[in-house]
Image (cartoon, rainbow, N blue to C red):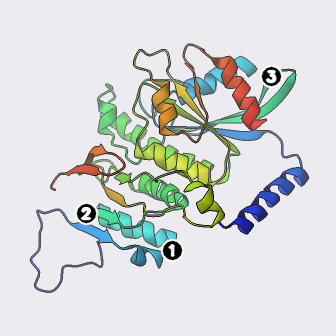
Amino acid sequence: MPGMQPPDGAPETPDGVQIDLISAGRMSNLRTMEKIRTILDSVHDGNIVILEDGLSPDEESKLIEVTMSEISPDGFTGIEIETYPKPSNDGGLFNRLMGKGSDNDNKLTVIGPANRIETLHKDENLISALVTRR
Amino acid sequence: MGLLTELRSSISRVTSKLFAPDQGPKRIGIYGPPNAGKTTLANRIARDWTGDAIGPESHVPHETRRARRKENVEIERNGKSVTIDIVDTPGVTTKVDYKEFLEHDIEKDDAVRRSREATEGVAEAMHWLREDVDGVIYVLDSAADPFTQVNTMLIGIIESKDLPVLIFANKTDLEESSVQQIANAFPQHETVPLSALEGDNMDEVYDKIAEYFG
């Protein structure tokens, strides 16, 4: 991800696949557009982004919109995105009454360039993806 | 949301409904992935109640690349009438590659133009969903896998907006159609089977539209 250069002395990996695991804490300090830029800048570089905590529905909506504006012929073709489905729609009446749960609770999310990542299998416990090299 | 907050928000929703000025017909967005039959459905509804179509239908993905609106569609059910504006939106996706159009015997220049228009159309559809629709008809191809990320995200976005939503399991005329699979994917919402192409089960479709959006 831009701004996330390898540590000094670390070998460059021009032919590899970089995976950025971004903590919930790091994302929680960012505004919506900052989150989207963090994700898309990394994906533009061909990286796979894994968010510990997913985006809110409104942020997902804006991510789709901004992604569309950046697609270009013979260049960026968009993103592949997968999240674990939420265990239930609203966490149950009890949780709603107690104010527990948010829109993106524990929604681990994998995002990558559409031309490099392909989802092979997904269920409530597992996301299996094929990532091709540059 | 806690109990008090939820109670306050429910009361606010009810009072705003009671005291809101008449804002005219509700705008109902027809959403779903590409090739689910959204325009075929929009045309079926528009033709049945206004006599006009909304836009061209095609098996080529992203044939609808601009949101199209049909205003004042008056649907009569059980002696009452419900007036809605239908907004037929481009199929939502997270990726568009012009090379997909080449597979449909479309020349490169045209394919590039279509893909550019398709991306603008998806962005427009998302904008409509965030800002400008009062309810959603979510159309799915009942012969295709509904468990996709785009479907999950869009239903999540619709739910977060508290918009009334009906799921339409389209293409029941196809042999591979499985309405149950669609119902299982989104059990929290009502699923209505139909074939927009053949006009099957349209009575129930109109009953539900009147019930949900009237």
Q: Which mark is residue A31?
A: 1
The local secondary structure at tag 1 comes to loop
CA gap, disc 2 and disc 1: 21 Å
Q: Residue at x 54, y 32 (%)?
A: B139
Circle 1 chain: A
Q: Position of residue B30 (x, y in %)?
A: 60, 36
| Closer to us: A55 or A124 | A124
Residue A48 in view of the camera: yes
Q: Quadrant of the C terminus of chain B?
A: top right
Q: Amino acid at mark 2?
A: Asn
Q: Amino acid at mark 3?
A: Arg
Q: Position of residue B78 (x, y in %)?
A: 83, 21
Residue under circle 3? B77
The local secondary structure at tag 3 comes to strand
- Please identify, in this view, whether the residue under mark 3 or under mark 2 is nearer the observer: 3
Q: Position of residue B207 (x, y in %)?
A: 73, 25
